[in-house]
């Protein structure tokens, strides 16, 4: 019966509180195993170093045993060559046993520490594989859902929903009321960002310079993709001074020779919906530039 089975049975027997505690331990098992491995490695190094201070007497005793065997051989106390070899082997075995006693604890803890670290990496790898599979499944389901929604209500309305667009009535200085589109940043998807005055790279009062900055950053991202072969979403978000996101560590772009995506980085200016948003920005209707990154999706499993 392995440890997992024993732990499971104890958890069931202990009731909900014990089961919850076991679940929490399982959740943080990679961190726990890594910490145990590091601590064990330090302890192992200390014990081995301490054992080395006692090594010299053991080696001296070993030399004494061999010397006694040679003396007996010179005095013809062994009836045969086989008996001599047996006595010499016995001397080596005794020394090996003493060395095992001396270094055994340190070496055992060291091996255990390595196994803990390897086990932690194995658990993390399995979880990453499961996460990648879940992301791929979610991506496929979302794309299929978007296609159905677009077919049902049209591209314009679907884009308004996806980008968090609402229509508000604004009264001008002349008292005339007009309807304007308002974009809700908190409603944007993981691939979409609103570049506006909340970003430290924003140049207030200089619309053309804001576009130029974004175009230069897009060129920089494509240069990095071409030179390295892959690019993560979090890298681009960081360059643009947007908060990084957990999924940005595995989502990004692959070079056209590696993946089956677009093979280039696009911040969304070629998207007709975005073009309208950005035209509104230049016209003073909106106060931000909508970015819609054309990520290829999860890329870790394809590297």
Image: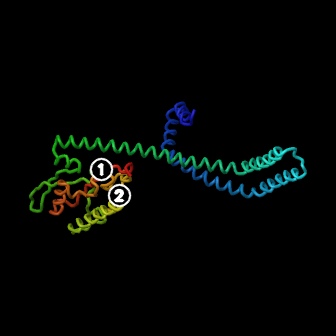
Q: Disc count in the image?
A: 2
Label 2: which residue?
229
Residue 87 placement, left or right of 149:
right
Of the 4 image quadrants, the one containing the N terminus is: top right
The one nearer the camera, 244 or 98, is: 98
| Separation of residues labelled 1 and 2 (CA atoms) | 13 Å
Q: Residue shown at 33%/53% (left/top)?
A: 258
Q: Which quadrant holds residue 46?
A: bottom right
Bin the neighbour count of mark 1 within 10 Å (Cα to Cα): few under 14, some 14-19, many 20 and up. Answer: few
- In the rendering, at what x and y percent does residue 260 appear? 30, 50
- In the rendering, at what x and y percent does residue 112 appear? 61, 47
Q: Residue shown at 12%/60% (left/top)?
A: 172
- Callout 2 secondary element: loop
The one nearer the camera, 190 or 169, is: 190
Residue 241 in sight in this render: no
Q: Which quadrant holds residue 138?
A: top left
- Callout 1 secondary element: loop
- In the rendering, at what x and y percent does residue 31 appear? 51, 49
Residue 42 placement, left or right of 300:
right
Label 1: which residue?
260
The one nearer the camera, 77 or 166, is: 77
């Amino acid at each position: 019966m392995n440890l997992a089975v024993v732990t499971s049975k104890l958890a069931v027997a202990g009731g909900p509180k014990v089961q919850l505690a076991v679940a929490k331990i399982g959740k943080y098992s990679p961190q726990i195993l890594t910490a145990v491995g590091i601590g064990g490695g330090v302890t192992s190094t200390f014990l081995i170093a301490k054992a080395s201070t006692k090594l010299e007497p053991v080696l001296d005793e070993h030399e004494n045993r061999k010397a006694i065997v040679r003396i007996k051989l010179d005095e013809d106390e062994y009836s045969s060559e086989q008996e001599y070899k047996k006595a010499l082997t016995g001397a080596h075995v005794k020394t090996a046993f003493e060395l095992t006693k001396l270094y055994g604890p340190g070496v055992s803890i060291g091996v255990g520490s390595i196994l803990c670290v390897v086990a932690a990496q194995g658990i993390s790898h399995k979880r990453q594989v499961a996460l990648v599979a879940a992301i791929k499944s979610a991506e496929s389901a979302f794309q299929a859902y978007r296609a159905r929604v677009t077919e049902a209500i049209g591209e314009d309305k679907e884009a308004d929903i996806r980008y968090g667009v609402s229509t508000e009535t604004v009264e001008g200085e002349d008292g005339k009321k007009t309807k304007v589109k308002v974009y809700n940043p908190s409603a944007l998807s993981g691939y979409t960002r609103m570049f506006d005055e909340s970003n430290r790279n924003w140049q207030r009062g200089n619309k053309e310079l804001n576009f130029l900055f974004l175009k230069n950053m897009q060129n920089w991202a494509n240069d990095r993709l071409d030179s390295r072969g892959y690019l993560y979403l979090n890298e681009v978000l960081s360059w643009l001074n947007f908060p990084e996101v957990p999924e940005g560590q595995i989502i990004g772009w692959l070079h056209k020779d590696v993946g089956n995506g677009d093979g280039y980085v696009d911040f969304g200016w070629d998207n007709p919906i975005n073009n309208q948003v950005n035209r509104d920005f230049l016209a003073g209707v909106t106060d931000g530039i909508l970015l819609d990154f054309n990520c290829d999706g999860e890329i870790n499993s394809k590297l």
